[in-house]
Amino acid sequence: MITPQRYWREIPQRYRLEAGKCKKCGYICFPPRLICPKCKNREFETVRLNDEGKIASFTIIRVPPEQFSDLSPYAIGIIELNDGVKILAQIVDCDFEELEIGKRVKVEFRKIRSEGEAGIICYGYKAVLLE
Amino acid sequence: MVGIVGYGAYIPRYRIKVEEIAKVWGADAPSYKKGLRLEEKSVPYLDQDTITLSVEASKNALKRAGINPKEIGAVYVGSESHPYAVKPSGTIVAEAIGATPEVYCADFEFACKAGTEAMHVCYSLVKSEEIKYGLAIGADTSQGAPGDALEYSASAGAAAFIFGKDNIIAEVEATYSFMTDTPDFWRREHQHYPRHGGRFTGEKAYFRHILGAARGIMEKTGTKAEDFSYVIFHQPNGKFPLKVGKMLGFSQEQIETGLLVPKIGNTYSGSSPLGLTAVLDIAKPGDRILLVSFGSGAGSDAFIFRVTERIREVQDKAPKTWDIINGKKFYLDYGTYAKFRGKILKA
């Protein structure tokens, strides 16, 4: 069970793809970090990642964790956004035969899961193929 | 001048055909197809709700408006299917588009006219210079009880409009509202599906209020049916808007562009607002548009818009509504549809 506090902390990243861009070397950290892994600098500016990219890799999940069982089977992929940042996201609204490495996708705002019948609803990003 | 500076639409990619629903309940599909002019309806995927549809429609509206979301001073989501009973949809939408924290926000409910009510409040706040821009959304993932007549039409979609004073694409020339207490359709607390008064939803509800609002705004502004390039009425089915249009002297050509219901169903709070997005997609500078919503309970809001020169700059900046409707689609069988809509649950 995800706590509302933990969900709330990640809202800027899950809703708006907010990343930290190193003010010294320009490296983009997603999610943001305190220290740049490239140059050890500690100053970042907040940037919103581009919401389009391409499939870097993908797989089909047929035996999912319990909370995602209604969605089974589903595709999940590593998406390389136009900024070069890679994110892990479910790929929805597709036939699996359509999926190929390199295909263009865009990020859409979707419900990720609900905490049972009475808990919070968690939202975030998923990918859909660009037509 | 106050008006729309950006607009956007979003419709889920899943569909179910009238025949598929009729087959399960032993109903006569041709009577729905011919009598009510319904062919298929949109269905939200398991991970879509009023909030996710609202966010996507708003992102498209922002692309057309070309403004910084931080300048949006109010976010109002009109819907009868807010995912939470207590906790606003608008806070999530505002956060997702980057409009927080200096923003007024509340959720609106008024059956199918909650979206146009949100539009009226945003328009008024901009006009009174309380805010620079206001985001009004009409969105729903509506439900019809299994086997009920509403199951053939209750669908999902969202339309978003950003109101402002600068760079407008359609000026609001006039507004008008016609409202009475009419119990034609309702859903009590903790009930999953709505109930309705059957034929009572027609003459005394839909027609009375749409006619009242349309005649009221035309009288107020001294306009006639032929003064409008397009008209959009609330569309619970394909028959009512054509009938009410004929009663008011409008031609089928004036109605057709904004008549989406045969292909996507009744998107409730998104219904007439989505029709407006389809009209704005092809409108030309100088066109005058009449929009008349209807929400059970019951009331109608009317708007007259005058399209400006800037419309041509924004039409291609986000997906067009008819392109979304005719784009990628996945057809569902009734079993999968029932699962998607939570009508059946895994043991």
Image (tube, rainbow, N blue to C red):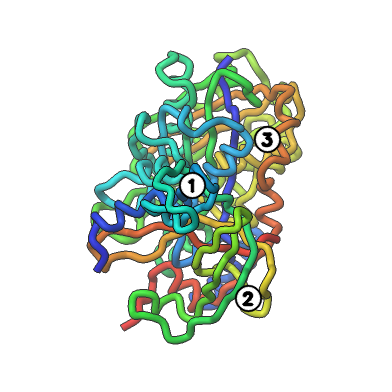
CA–CA distance in space, label 3 to label 2: 32 Å
Residue at the spot x=37%, y=41% of the render? B90
Front position in the image: B178 or B61: B61
Across and down, in percent, residue B98 comes to 45, 40
**CB atoms at circles 3 and 1 under 8 Å apart?**
no
Front position in the image: B290 or B87: B87
The quarter in which the C terminus of chain A is drawn is bottom right
For badge 2, the amino acid type reads Asp
Q: The numbered mark 3 sits on a residue in which chain?
A: B
- In the figure, residue A117 lies in which quadrant? bottom left
Q: Secondary structure at mark 3?
A: helix
Point out which mark residue A22 bears.
1
Position of residue B330 in the picture relative to residue B186 (left or right): right
Mark 2 surroundings within 10 Å by alpha-carbon count, few (fewer than 14), some (14 through 19), many (20 or more): few
Residue at the spot x=42%, y=69% of the render? B146
For badge 1, the amino acid type reads Cys
Same chain, labels 3 and 1: no
Position of residue B290 in the picture relative to residue B157 (left or right): right
Front position in the image: A1 or B299: A1
For badge 3, the amino acid type reads Leu
Q: Is residue B97 visible?
A: yes
The quarter in which the N terminus of chain A is drawn is bottom left
Q: Secondary structure at mark 1?
A: strand
Q: Which residue is mark 3?
A: B280
Position of residue B250 in the picture relative to residue B151 (left or right): right
Point out which mark residue A95 bears.
2
Across and down, in percent, residue A23 comes to 49, 42
Mark in the foreground, 3 or 1: 1
Residue at the spot x=68%, y=30% of the render? B249
Across and down, in percent, residue B65 comes to 60, 32
